[in-house]
Image (cartoon, helix red, strand yellow):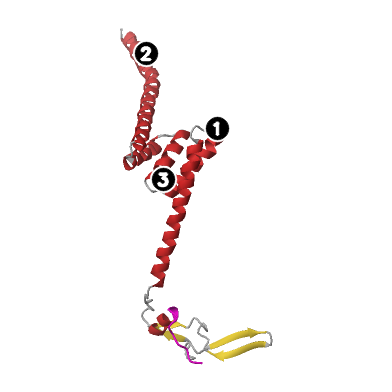
């Protein structure tokens, strides 16, 4: 009788193990369907003008889907433009065009969105450059450290300025640091702003 119970136990264990891969496969399919429904929802949100909510759903899909459908590249690229992430938009729209080429369903739209994203990114860079110029043109003082001195950048501390000419080298005493080899912090900051008057 024990032998019969043991055989039945072994058979039930084998059946359970045989069902595990099927259950796992079913779970994986359900997970993929749920993720793809998030993608569908994101596309609907983009079309409805809910770009930030759509962006969150696209990000979720990207994190959880192992195989990314090419259509996602187009929709995510378009939505990225609409939320002002122009670099990201350019990357994903280019990816869609590379994957699908001219035969892609959204090829014409992808090219138009890509042009818009490139133009917006160019404006963004111009603004960044303008902002950097404004910051650099302000009268900031550089901290020269605990000594309050900086090696003269004109003569590199040698106290002599060497000029090479076609007749040979000429050696002149450095008028910027007055032959000290260094500048105090005030003079250094004036030099950087072009305000230091050097006496020859």
Is 55 within the magenta? no
Residue corresponding to mark 1: 103
Give the CA distance from mark 1 to mark 3. Answer: 23 Å
Q: Give the residue displayed 48% in from the left and 87% down from the top.
A: 176
Image location of residue 157, percent across then percent down: 50, 84
Residue corresponding to mark 3: 81
Residue corresponding to mark 2: 11
Mark closest to the chain's N terminus, 3 or 2 = 2
Image location of residue 44, percent across then percent down: 35, 33
Task: Tell me the crowding category of disc 3: few under 14, some 14 to 19, or many 20 or more residues within 10 angstroms, Cα based.
Answer: many
Circle 3 SS class: helix
Q: Tell which of 157 and 198 is nearer to you.
A: 198
Chain part drawn in magenta: 191-200
Image location of residue 148, percent across then percent down: 37, 83
Mark closest to the chain's N terminus, 2 or 1 = 2
Q: Circles 3 and 2: CB distance less than 8 Å? A: no
Task: Tell me the crowding category of disc 2: few under 14, some 14 to 19, or many 20 or more residues within 10 angstroms, Cα based.
Answer: few
Quadrant of the frame with the N terminus: top left
Image location of residue 119, percent across then percent down: 47, 51
Question: Compared to 112, does 129 lie above or below?
Answer: below
Q: Give the residue displayed 50% in from the left and 43% down from the top.
A: 94
């Amino acid at each position: 009788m024990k032998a019969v119970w043991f055989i039945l136990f072994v058979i039930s264990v084998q059946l359970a193990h045989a069902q595990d891969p099927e259950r796992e496969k079913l779970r994986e399919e359900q997970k993929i369907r749920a993720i793809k429904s998030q993608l569908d929802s994101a596309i609907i949100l983009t079309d409805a003008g809910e770009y930030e909510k759509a962006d969150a759903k696209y990000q979720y899909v990207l994190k959880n889907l192992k195989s990314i459908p090419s259509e996602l590249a187009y929709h995510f690229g378009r939505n990225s433009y609409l939320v002002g992430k122009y670099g990201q938009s350019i990357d994903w729209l280019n990816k869609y065009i590379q994957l699908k080429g001219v035969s892609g369903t959204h090829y014409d739209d992808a090219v138009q969105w890509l042009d818009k994203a490139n133009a917006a990114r160019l404006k963004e860079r111009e603004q960044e450059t303008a902002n950097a110029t404004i910051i650099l043109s302000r009268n900031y003082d550089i901290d020269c450290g605990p000594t309050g001195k900086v090696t003269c950048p004109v003569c590199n501390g040698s106290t002599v300025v060497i000029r090479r000419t076609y007749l040979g080298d000429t050696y002149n005493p450095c008028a910027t640091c007055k032959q000290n080899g260094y500048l105090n912090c005030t003079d250094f900051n004036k030099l950087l702003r072009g305000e230091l008057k050097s006496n020859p």
